[in-house]
Amino acid sequence: MAVPVRTAADVRELASWHADWSGLRVAVLGLGVTGFSVADTLVELGAEVLVIAGRADPDRAELLDVIGARLVVTAPDTDSTRELEHFDPELVVVSPGFAPTHPLVSWCTGRGVAVWGDVELAWRVRDKVTPVADWFTVTGTNGKTTTVQLAAAMMRAGGKRVIACGNVGIPVLDAIRDPEGFDALVVELSSFQLHYAESISAHTSVCLNIADDHLDWHGSADAYRQAKASIYQRTRVACLYNRDDPATMTMVEEADVVDGCRAIGFGLGIPGPSDFGLVEDVLCDRAFLDQRHTSAIEITTTDVLDARGLGSPHMIANVLAASAIARSAGVSPQHVRDALHRFTLDSHRTETVADRHGTRWVDDSKATNPHAAEASITAFDRVVWVVGGLLKGADLGALVVRVAPRLRAAVIIGSDRQQVLAAFARHAPELPLFEVDTTDTELVMPTAVRLSSGVAGPGDVVLLAPAAASMDQFRDYADRGRRFRNAVHEMLGDAPDDDHSTPPHSPHHD
């Protein structure tokens, strides 16, 4: 029997696992962890799948052949639009790294072919297992992963079957296909994923903060912010915004949400009704209680957070946001507190790797953009800053102006060193600068640590908070952090603990 040709309108109507996906011609762009999960899902749905990738892990390539998807690996200079034209896809699902300006994406949009991301596909087929899990979506320039992990831990403490997924943990398509099902998915979403999502209607959504990032991918600061703001569209129960970042409030005010959805603020000040905030050293909920106009519920204290490595201002904000997510899901304050007492931060997030002779060495390799680096630096009074990498179109000038009073010196690494040096020359010309100009990956961190040691004294913090991506000189931010830690211990004459951990599944796009 001939397979019917689907029009663009037909494809838009595919909004259930139980819809007729059979024979749908779908091109999948990219074969990382996300791309494979997309191809695997689509084959299970009965679609005809072509995967186009610039490179392919041999194991994934072999599995594609086993499940019945076709793979085309293209050389860097190859015009692979010819493969698309020959396949004539009715739908294209892109991995998050494909910018809207990529030739393959442009080819699709120019011909009116629907272009989705993995998250959009997952939302449409989320009803494979019933009851269908609620989605709690989290974005922001910084703090997403910690907030998602905190919220999931709080829900788990409250007895919910929950998983952190999306841009952290496992791909969201793997989560919605788990045969046991979940009560809730806490979904970390990058701006890349949000750009390619158009119909998510989350139970609760939050944009933690917003600062310019990934301008090279989005093309402009406005496009980046629009992608982030889209997380609030169609939210059903609660839109959470950062009272200390007015742009997030504006996003909520402009969002088209489901009737009855509440706007709930969180921030480091005293909370108003329907807010989460701080009263002296107590974190409070004034949103999810009947007497919110006259009283508040204690969540925890800053002393407890200090003991868990969560006491810096940006971490407190993450805790408040996660608490609001969990409370919106009906988790009790006691279960929120229980989770916080047990929570441990991932490596490479403001992690003290050594404290010797009055100098503290801190790995915040996850600070991959200026906004994250600023949050990290301002948690300390006197900093020797290890900075640099791939700047992704960001300008460090404004950051240097704001943090210069806290800096003792800067040690500059990475391929974009000249831009970093220029920012210091313009805005902090008196600050001592040390450049790591080696291109040998094995020598970058030992050299940076040696230079830092030469200038750091008692009371100083040597802080790896690069404000830049890592892939110029390292495999990823975790590799960068491990090499920093190992270099510190080698310099101090210690034997570092073996760390074979790897970062969660995705490249952590934001």
Image: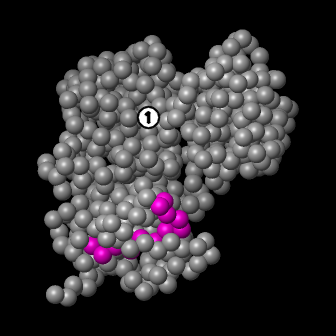
Residue 82 in the image: state x and y as whole percent: 49, 84
Disc 1 residue type (three-letter) = Thr
Q: Could you tell whether 91 is left or right of 379 in the image?
A: left
Residue 40 in the image: state x and y as whole percent: 32, 62
Place residue 377 in its image quadrant. Answer: top right
Place residue 504 in its image quadrant. Answer: top left
Q: Residue at x 47, y 54 (%)?
A: 191
The colouring scheme, among rainbow, by chain, secondary structure or one colour, is: one colour
User: Can you identify the residue that label 1 sits on?
Assistant: 146
Number of numbered discs visible in the structure rendering: 1
In magenta segment, residue 488: no
Q: Is residue 100 visible?
A: no
Q: Which residues are magenta?
A: 47-58
Q: Residue at x 57, y 50 (%)?
A: 213
Q: Residue at x 54, y 61 (%)?
A: 218
In magenta segment, residue 51: yes
Q: Residues within 10 Å of mark 1 (few under 14, many from 20)?
A: many
Q: Nearer the viewer, residue 268 or 369?
A: 369
Q: Nearer the viewer, residue 45 or 261?
A: 45
